Image (cartoon, rainbow, N blue to C red):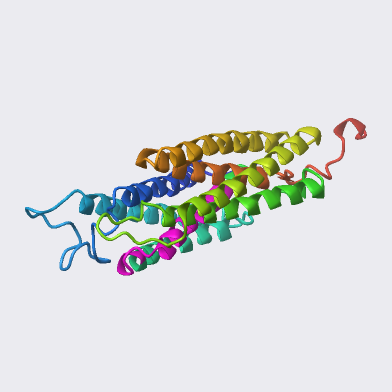
Amino acid sequence: MPVTSPWLRRILLTNLVLQVLIVVTGGLVRLTGSGLGCPTWPQCEEGSYTPVLHDAITFHPFIEFGNRLLSMVVGLAALATVAAVWRWARRRTPMWGLALGVLALTLSQGILGGITVRTGLHPTTVMTHFLVSMALVALSTALLLREGEPDGPRSPAVPALVRQLALATAAVLVAVLVLGTVVTGSGPHSGDADEPARFGFDPRTISWLHADAVMLFVGLVVAVLVATTLVSGASRSRGWWSAVLLISLAQGLVGYTQYLTGLPEILVLVHMLGAAALTVAVTGGVLTLWDRQRVGTEHEPDRQHLPA
């Protein structure tokens, strides 16, 4: 393993945790109808960057403002990630590029958040906001995994067919996430308590399309898990895919329960957290289908055959 500072892993882990946490608080904003609690951007209200206390004030401005404060912390963590990788790992492929990607997408989230507020929480911008967060979770997971690997050449740990199957499963997860955001954008939790903004699709039809995609995804996950069980050299990836299956089943249970019980806010929030956990697990499952060798281990002579 390359010599590095323990602070690098701590910073990368903190960044990942915050990227997941901002998904949860963003969901809280939407589910409480607080999306326009701060009706403008970058200020919260005209002439003030913080909620203005008055007799008619509700809890909505404080929830939205709290989410904005956390987004600033997330931005600082992304900056710290870039600084840490530059300090300790900028020559470790591809950590520098991943760190820059995290920072760029985090900054774009701030801009997209402003556009979302100024467009009255249009479901397309809200949907994009969530999907970019999922991309950030995936990048942050990849960065953390790469930090724990040696610096030798990267080579496949399983046959090409297994890798292709895993990549197809990841692609179906993207479709599941997209359809999930469309379901939310067609349902009652639009983000604003007074003037709901929705896609206008039939919620029942979109929900069943989402469920069909989930069934396809679970079937592919089972196939990948079986493949990594049968193929030697895939023990590390098998653990990740086992986690993917468990999270998927839990997500299915939560999804059907919330559908049958009228979309209670707490279950929708748990479902969003599950989506982030699923993104972490699938990212880990795909990336661990490749291994990196320790530098110098492949061509070192066998010491027991060296001359005395």
Residue 33, percent across and down? 29, 52
Relative to 268, is 87 above or below? below
285 and 126: which is toward the camera? 126
Residue 136 sits inside the magenta stretch: yes
Left or right: residue 262 versus residue 68 is right
Residue 11, percent across and down? 45, 46
Name the residue: 46% across, 42% down.
259
Left or right: residue 235 versus residue 265 is right
Residue 240 in sight from this viewpoint: yes
Relative to 257, is 96 above or below? below
Residue 29 sits inside the magenta stretch: no
Outermost residue, left side:
55
User: Which quadrant does the N terminus fall into?
Assistant: top right
Name the residue: 59% across, 33% down.
246
Left or right: residue 47 versus residue 299 is left
What count of labels does the image hold?
0
Left or right: residue 228 versus residue 306 is left
Residue 143 in sight from this viewpoint: no
149 and 157: which is toward the camera? 157
User: Which quadrant does the C terminus fall into?
Assistant: top right
Please state the extent of the stretch shown in magenta in the rendering.
Answer: 116-143
Residue 14, percent across and down? 44, 44
Name the residue: 62% across, 36% down.
245
Residue 102, percent across and down? 49, 57
Magenta stretch, main secondary structure, is helix
